[in-house]
Amino acid sequence: MAEKLNVGLIVTLSGRWPRELPVRRHKEYTAWARENLSDMNLVMPEQVLTTPQEVDQAISDMRREQVDAVVMVYGAFTGDDIAASIVQKMNVPLILWAPYELPYEREERLWANALCAMTMNAAALGRLGYPCHTVYGSKEDERAAKKVISLLKGYAVKKAMSRMTLGLFGYRPTNYYVSTFDETVIRRTFGITMNATELKTVFDDMAALPEEEVKADMEKVSAAWDISRLPEGHLENHSRLYLALKNRVKTDGYDFGIIKCWPEMGAAHTQPCAVLGRLLDDGLSIGCEGDVDAGITQVLEMLLSENNAPFITDMIDINEDENTMTFWHCGNAAPSLHNPKYHPELCNHPLVGQGSAFWTALKPGCVTIARLHNYHGQYKLVLMKGEALDRDRVTRGCMTRVKMTAPVRRTTERLIEEEIPHHYVLVWDDIYDAMKQTAALLNIPVIEL
């Protein structure tokens, strides 16, 4: 992510409670944050917050550092005033985190009462009209720690997407109604800005490239893949398009892109499937077939999986006996997804020719499958998961067979019932819960399959 999330972490108590436990928790939870939130900018007061003056100073410091979200750890029981001050004066998301109580002893006093305080504070914030997040459990409890990290990662993704510019290279392919989009709904939901570059500009960029750059990339590609079945001239077009898109994205200030990959590009013998796969391994997402919603899904998966390359694909078949779905696309899978066991090739487009595409089986492993879809002005997110199997391809192009968690026939029927378009996005990572959490932060309903 280009810009980190700024996170405030405070430890609190009301003044009449003993300070020994809160001071210890302050030391332990700030150390936990430094270790587990190292990819975020942390703003953490040096002491436990108790008095209004201490709280006001911490709020002033966090506002100066433009904190995006605050985690409030209960050192001990805390009244409603601190949480209310944070949300009213800062207007940022607040995560209330109540660690477990110390072991009870009959003649000892209650040392924290954190769960009670969190329950009270959350109810008070609700009355004031300020929603918050609640987490119950000590940092050693993976459920609690994971929830805090997931919430903050979701806010980091939300912040990153709101600062992105999407570049449209052309519009949509002929008769692809599901690739239409609503720019205002995208801006309202994700904060993404959209601009456009004509395909002619890309073709002009390809023609203007220095010959030595093109030759160097052609040699690189020839050394990496079997190109024996690639028609004459297609390798040069491949390298020219690869270099031109990388340059154009930078020149026009795009964070990611969507391209109308046919029919014009095919007519110029530069169908871009393999180019898009290579760009993904460079960390640059350019979605195919003008499918903006699939492209946004791809970017979301990249952000949540720490830049793993996703795969925009069709679901073409199911096998009820194996409970598998077969996912296939023309040849756009990133090289990092290829299964070397089955001899990946760089060939012509598998259906219409006129370009470059990878023909390969994809690697085995856990996959999260998703699709964002604008349905009558409201985005929804479909989520599925499974295990990609170690299987060879059975037709031209890129292919993987996934053993699904849910029954495949009912899943397929639900996808059709929910009117979900035909492109899905696979990523080789278990980000199912993180996708679900991020969708909630964006107010996007989730269809879990």
Image: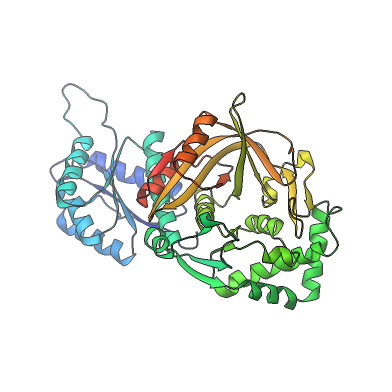
Furthest toward the left, the residue is 16
Horizontal placement of 305 versus 207: left or right? left
Q: Is residue 102 above or below residue 7?
A: above
Horizontal placement of 55 versus 436: left or right? left
Residue 443 vs residue 182, the one in the foreground: 182
Furthest toward the front, the residue is 175
Residue 18 vs residue 301, the one in the foreground: 301
Residue 30: give x, y in percent of width and height: 36, 48
Horizontal placement of 393 versus 119: left or right? right
Q: Residue at x 53, y 65 (%)?
A: 255
Residue 22, image quadrant:
top left
Q: Residue at x 73, y 78 (%)?
A: 208
Q: Is residue 368 visible?
A: yes
Residue 359: give x, y in percent of width and height: 75, 47
Count of numbered labels shown in the rendering: 0
User: Colour scheme of this structure image?
Assistant: rainbow
Furthest toward the top, the residue is 106
Residue 64: give x, y in percent of width and height: 31, 67
Q: Is residue 405 visible?
A: no
Residue 256 vs residue 359, the one in the foreground: 359
Q: Residue at x 60, y 73 (%)?
A: 198
Residue 65: give x, y in percent of width and height: 34, 64
